[in-house]
Amino acid sequence: MSKKRPASEYQKTFAFRFFRWLSGEKDPYIGEMEMHPQEEYQPDREAALRHEREHDAIMDKVYDTEHNRSLHLFHRLYQATSILFCLFLIALLLVTISYLPATGTVNRPVNNEVAKRYIEKGLEETGAVNIVAGMILDYRAFDTLGESHVLFVATITVLILLRLNKTQKDEAEISDRRFEPKNDAILQLVATFLVPVIIIFGIYIILNGHLGPGGGFSGGAVIGAGLVLYLNAFGFKKTERFFTEKTYKWVCFFSLSFYCLAKSYSFYTGANQLHSVIPKGTPGAILSSGLILPLNIAVGLVVACTIYAFYAMFRKGGF
Amino acid sequence: MNFICNFPFFSILLSLFSGTVCSVLPAKAAKAVNRVVIIAVGLMSAVLLLYLLSTGESFIYWMGHFPAPWGNEIRAGVLEAGMALFFCIIMYLSMAGGAHKLPGEVVESKHNLYYILVNLLLSSLLALVYTNDMFTAYVFVEINTISACGLIMIRQVGRTIEAAVRYMIMSLLGSGLLLFGLCIMYDLTGHLLMSNIKESVAQLIAAGEYQIPLIVSVALMCIGLCIKSALFPFHAWLPDAYGYSTVSSAAILSSLVSKGYIFLLIKIIYRVIGFDIFNSTRIIDVLFVFGLMGMIFGSLSAIKENDIRRMIAFSSVAQIGYIYMGFGMGTQAGMVASVFHILSHAATKSLLFIAAIGLTDVSGGSRKFIDLTGAAYRNKWAGVAFTAGSLSMVGIPLFSGFISKLLFAQAAVQVEGKMLASLIVLGISTVLNAIYFMKTVIRIYTTAGESPYSGVTFRDMKAYAVTLLFFILLNVALGVSSQPVVNMIEQGLAMFA
Amino acid sequence: MTAFQIILMGFLIICAVSVSFSKNLLNAILIYMSFSLVMSMLWICLESPDLAITEAAVGAGITSVLFFVTLKKIRAIEASEPEAKGESREEKNE
Amino acid sequence: MGPNLFTNYGEAVSAVLFCIGFTNLLLQTNLIKKIIGLNIMDSAIYLFLAEKGYIAGRVAPIVVNGVTSTEAYINPIPSGLVLTGIVVSVSVTALMLSLTIRLYTRYHTLNLDEISMQLKKEGK
Amino acid sequence: MYFILLSIFFPILAGLFLLIRFRTPLSGEKAGTDRKPLLVLTGIFLVITAVFAFAAPLTAREGFTLFYLTETLPIYFRIDSVGQLFSLLAVIVLLCAGFFSFSYMKHEERESRYYGFYLILFGVLNALCFAGNLITFYLFFELLTLSSMPLVLHNGSREAIMAGLKYLFYSLCGAYGALFGIYFLYQSCDTLTFTAGGVLKETAVTQHGGFLLLTAFVMLLGFGVKAGMFPMHAWLPTAHPVAPAPASAVLSAVIVKAGVLAVVRITGYIFGTGFLRGTWVQTVWMCLTLITVFMGSMLAYREPVLKKRLAYSTVSQLSYILFGLAVMNEASLVGSLFQVLAHGFVKAALFLCAGAIIYKTGKTRVEEMRGIGKEMPLTMWCWTIASLGLVGIPPTGGFVSKWYLALGSLKSGLPVLDVLGPIILLVSALLTAGYLLPLTIHGFFPGGDYDYSGLQKKEPRKLMTVPILILTSLPVVIGLFPDTIAGIILMAVKGR
């Protein structure tokens, strides 16, 4: 007979654990997933504080980034893997590129009947001298419609994130003035000259979108930049006279609605092979190329307002 | 052309336009517009679906005055119309189920912005479903991403903002890869429309040209979409994003947004690359392995979780793993199973999120399990709904989850090499699912001692209860009469080719 | 023309790398701005004036302005609440 | 290695830029630098596309003197795509920057890792 | 056909009605105001269900399809003799235990939940007995687990909840093992409808014979979980004792038999005994059952808590049945099915006796029960008779079943196991006597030093004693007419 071992030692043996499992006493969930009934809540301030302190101490220890070696190691590992991955990606892409058709040559899959028709018939079918403008606003107008809504939805998210209510806005305004040059004479003088020029240039780009390089988006961005300059030189007080949140809202609404409706009409007539009433005009004239000019203007308005809105939002959470 | 053929176009434009309109409306009107639009789009999709089933053919719709390779196109088949209908149903139910929580979660002045986001999200989902053009798909993927990000962070607590940042970073990586793949594909084929690309790809494969760039391009697109739909190693943003955003957002995000990307991937596989060509690459093996890993690790993380909504979020990771496992099998049956799982998971996961909020509401707003004890007695409807959702997740017959698991298993049995791995992992994952879901169910049905929280009755939450009822019915309907749905999916996939 | 393109591309890579290693955020943004300008010149070389004009207005203009505003905003927050660091202030509209 | 690596030097540069941007987006802990990385990544793709449209010896696709022959102009499609893409990337940048401001007002740091540490420390 | 549907869906709906109508009181509130209507309704529902369940086999002999889960998976019901046999057992035990619980459940809370799930369980069991193909069977097998779980964790203590979880996970794991098999069978069978002799395709057998054997083994293990077979038996002694006594009776007597029915179905009706006989699966399976028989008895022998002892005894006795099924010849099959009936009645009677003792005296451990026979003579007499039935003393059903089992085993001609089997059965029977009869002995003869002064009559009410009496008499009855019953069973086995 072997010597009888003490209970605590016996409980560590494999035989004990096996027997416990065999007799169904072992419960794998106890300790893993506690299901005990809810205890009654007893407010014990002292214990709660102590608990909190302990918790903080543990948390400090666990999340002590400077001294936690495993975390450090993990970080290193992560970095190394990322770099390796990126090197691998570079190699992969370079290999891929080396197999691609040669750039600059004519006989490539890219220069197929699609591009051919755009160039040869573009002027006739869309009325736009700038083939790119004709392509994005007529042949592939659905993409562009989506694109302007990307801008719209981005504005909405920025509004959600940064728009403040009245009192917060005032606070923000005060903190905003901290680094602001107040009524800088040079800036104002330069702005007086520059802003009209910039805005007129922007309008030119928009109106000329179908005739030369440019278009609603770039022109709108230029006008927006002009507005931002104006705002910087003269402050919010001045701009609020002609540009408030309401202006922005309605300008955006009308432009986008016009865009949507005009394009819907064009898509609908196109798909159902109906005759579209919109005249194409003489190629080369400013009033030509059907819907492209009004669409450019609409996009330009939206973009200009959006850029200004972004800036104002970023600075003080409102207009 | 039949007038009904205009419906896909109408639904996309209607939801886009309603987004613009909502920006000038007060919150109440915006809500009404949102509901009406979702219902209208749903009705149109239903009519379209019936029409397509009766004709049995898909059709192409010009977006503009120019035919195939020159202008944009959208395309509607049975699967697209069915998906659109289903997305509308889920979206309506999710919005209705979370409506009563919205005032507490979002500042009053930002409500109409919320509805704008939902409308635009719907339009982008519809566009992803219907589009026949890769670049359009890219643009609408971006709308989808940004509006989803908006939905995450509209409830402005620190966590959601952090989650939104993580989500955006991952999504942008994904978009970048997708766009790069797209550009390479464009360079090789010279087309952007799916059907034309497919022809060119078939020619290239037949001629044996440009094999390496072709595969790299496909791989880049796949990885991009996998990252965006939170396949296993890329899921770090997911629990916070789903766990802390508003209820409706969580339901919509988990059940629709990631599914939109997955559906796009299906379209790419079928309509851009060609199913057989895709299956001959090694990409499916990679998808298969990551799918399996996702199934296990997602469930393991869910078991460790002590917060009911994060637990459900982690379970999403596992479920997305299932879908990719189906892709990875490389058979038609696997694909059908995956598509069915998209439906079943969407129906179940949104149900779980909506039910979970009912439970946490009657537990003092806490999501810790310890506080949820007995919550099902305090809010009976939510309790029943949560139980139904859990049973579906665990794969009890009569619920949709069982059918999708059955389909996966049937698909797996047909693939010699991957049979055992997928069946075993399916089993392990089922059991793990059972562990954490049944644990929760038992927890919420345990009565213990005095409860400090008061319950709610049917009268307090009619709309909510009805929503839950519809969700349960949807789930059971998918589980009981799955054959028509499966037939429809098969038909739709056949139309893709 | 090719030589010019190659030089511009060299600039692009230098800019991109130095953005990654610059310690100062303002420098990084400035370098990024020049990156955009170089890019827009490159596009002129590639016969895409539309892109050039857009990139100049957007990449070099608007994006950089937005970056600057962000930076300024962050500095302002830093200056106004130096003591609040580490302690998480509850959002008002939470 | 394929035959066209040196002919396609523009694409090669864009690939390198893409990966630099990608690495920045993955590795930089500072949010603003991450965003710059994102922009570089996007620009790289646009450069790639623009290179694809380029044909040596031809001019920009703006009809001059009514000449509408394919031999005269470069391919207009990539330009159109890039235009769309630029708008997308500026929208995303604006959104990311506003997220950055918001995070900074709450956590007073631009380091994403630190923020998540802080979140975990707060104990959910 | 309508009776089948009624016998299934009537109790389920009735149970749901009870759950909804008699609201479970929120914690803290005191129930009891509407106890009487609850009991009356439950009683009526139980009787009606029983009538339906009896009437079903008389009216419908051919199967019918309720609806199609998927195109190839119909929900199909058909009544055959084996199903009828199990149904008979289920109805009798559920009725008796149901009436027993009217009085027993007085001191438990949340009665409406108990009765609601009890009725649902009744319906599910009927469905399980009448299921005509594997997928229907599987469906109700899962539902059985789910609907019986609330009974296990009824009293809501931590122990009960953990036991319930353990029960759930073991069952789900087992069910998944079974489902795993179904996935394969789906490929290698034309149909999953239960057909005597098996439904395997010839080609499948020749091509994937080895794999099908593995599948069969996995399925046996999976369904064996429910029947408490060796490697997965551990849930049974945890889960059964924590339930209220009548629920334990149902669990031990009927619900575990669902596992047995499953094994009968897959061996006899899906794979076919011809396919399995003489393979490694049979050998391994027999070894496992014999291990379980012996182990269960040993564990029961050293267990001090009465209900737990009975649960271990269930583990052991169920494997008698499985052993008989594993031998796969006529005599052993008869023995097995006989044992199903005998053990079902006996174990129900024993658990109800234990319940009565607990209800009246509150004693749970065996050593506390000295002199109990003086206090509750009727109960103890029933206990004694039932114990003898379990041990296998001649005039009872237990003897007949064991006789046939031993006979079958000896006839089987398997090397070693043909003799080893009966020996282990015999040893186990001795152990059974060893763990059950001491209660009788100490109960009636507490010994010389026993203090008789504190004794008082504690015989329970009629509502408790009558079910016990019925359940005690039934095994004796079937033991008295072994040939008749065996003939019927034989006919059932042959006629199928």
Image: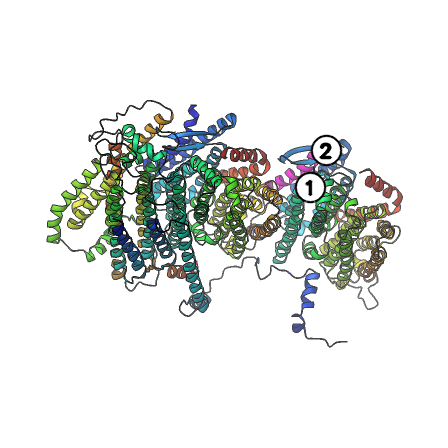
Residue farthest bottom in this picture = A3
The chain under label 1 reads: E
The chain under label 2 reads: E
Q: Is residue E22 magenta?
A: yes
Residue E349 vertical position relative to residue B35 in the rendered view, above or below: below
- Ranked by sequence position, the earlier of labels 2 and 1 is 2
**SS for callout 1:** helix
Task: Say what amino acid the circle numbered 2 marks.
Answer: Gly
Which numbered marker is on residue E188?
1
> Between residues A63 and B491, which one lies in front from this camera angle?
B491
Horizontal and vertical percent position of residue A239: 18, 45
Disc count in the image? Answer: 2
Horizontal and vertical percent position of residue B82: 49, 34
Residue B142: which quarter of the image? Answer: top left
> Between residues A63 and B223, which one lies in front from this camera angle?
B223
CA neighbours of label 2 inside 10 A, class few (<14), some (14 to 19), many (20+): some
* Residue position for label 2: E63
**Magenta stretch: helix, strand or loop mostly:** helix
Q: Are marks 2 and 1 in contact (CB under 8 Å)?
A: no
> Between residues D29 and A169, which one lies in front from this camera angle?
D29
| Residue B230 in view in this figure | yes
| Alpha carbon distance from label 2 to label 1 | 23 Å
| Residue A154 in view in this figure | no
Find the magenta span and give its range: E3-25
> Between residues A1 and A295, which one lies in front from this camera angle?
A295
Which numbered marker is on residue D84?
none
Residue D27 vertical position relative to residue B18 in the rendered view, above or below: below
